[in-house]
Amino acid sequence: MTERTVAYTADAIRAAEAPLLAAGRPLMREAARALAAVVADELARTPGPVLVLAGSGDNGGDALFAAADIARAGTRVDVVLTRDRVHREALDTALAAGARLRDASEICASDPDHVLVLDGILGIGASADPRLRGTARAVVEALLPAVVAGRVRVVAVDVPSGLHPDSGEADAAVLPAETTVTFGAVKAGLLRGYGPRLSGRLVLVDLGLEPQLRRVHPAITAAVPVVRRSSPERA
Ligand SMILES: NC(=O)C1=CN([C@@H]2O[C@H](COP(=O)(O)OP(=O)(O)OC[C@H]3O[C@@H](n4cnc5c(N)ncnc54)[C@H](O)[C@@H]3O)[C@@H](O)[C@H]2O)[C@@H](O)CC1
Ligand SMILES: [K+]
């Protein structure tokens, strides 16, 4: 009998994160460390270069801090920024660790030689309309055939980019993930609408948020399995 997975809305999770952040918990570093460990497990099975898609917010920040760990482990890591803004410290950390900045137009022009894409374009900060636009959309549409053909696997950071974190609504420009590494609590959108189809295996990084969430926020549940990992920093 599959354990029922409990999920919450993005706002509830953000509210639960706030006091931890205010207390100075390095949540992003903890999230990124756990994310890099999941990617390392995936690469152990099929080694090869990793393509990191980074958006302009903290979702991109998670992906870029994880990219630094992945590059340090000796994997070739290419980074594509999908917006002109980016989490500066995370990008600098990734580049200092040996990750290489590539132009989105290069990725759109040729078939990727990567084995894995880390999708850090958009997470729970998606505006009301999470549909991807501009460069983010162009890069996702360029990668879709290789992903759908199974030549490239996707690890989604927190939620697949373009999927609504609460409702699970999505349009065609979303990279179906083999694994979604979600932080603090499962987002409702991973269990609703297109969520189950686009998110793949769910890995929940336990940041110690759930007791607080359970006390104050209504939850949704579904019989979708989830793998729980505590973040290495807290282990
Ligand atoms: N709050 C925290 O400290 C933590 C947050 N974490 C990460 O932070 C993420 C949330 O970060 P943010 O609040 O910065 O938001 P996001 O990084 O999810 O996205 C916000 C950025 O995306 C842009 N954007 C909005 N709608 C878009 C669209 N439709 N297409 C393309 N770009 C769009 C916005 O301009 C904004 O710059 C989470 O998903 C998670 O990955 C985790 O590290 C856990 C801890
Ligand atoms: K994402």
Image (tube, grey):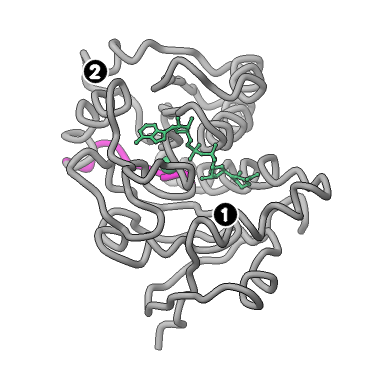
Say what secondary structure mark 2 lies in.
helix
Report, in whole angstroms, how far the alpha carbon at label 2 lies from the one at label 1.
30 Å
Seen as rendered, the residue at the extreme bottom is: 1
Observer-nearest of 57 and 63: 57
Say what secondary structure mark 1 lies in.
strand
Q: Residues within 10 Å of mark 1 (few under 14, many from 20)?
A: many
Q: Amino acid at mark 2?
A: Cys
Q: Residue at x 27, y 47 (%)?
A: 176
Q: Amino acid at mark 1?
A: Phe
Q: Residue at x 62, y 76 (%)?
A: 214
Observer-nearest of 207 and 38: 207
Q: Is mark 1 within 8 Å of ligand 1?
A: yes
Q: Which residue is mark 1?
A: 183
Position of residue 32 measured from the top left corner of the image (x, y, whole percent): 62, 41
Q: Is residue 89 a member of the stretch shown in magenta?
A: no
Quarter location, residue 224: bottom left
Q: Is residue 159 left or right of residue 16?
A: left
Quarter location, residue 191: bottom left
Q: Which residue is mark 2?
A: 108
Q: How many marks?
A: 2
Magenta-highlighted residues: 149-157
User: Residue 179, relative to residue 51: is it above or below?
Assistant: below
Q: Is residue 23 left or right of residue 94?
A: right
Position of residue 182 measured from the top left corner of the image (x, y, whole percent): 51, 54
User: Residue 153, relative to residue 88: is it above or below?
Assistant: below
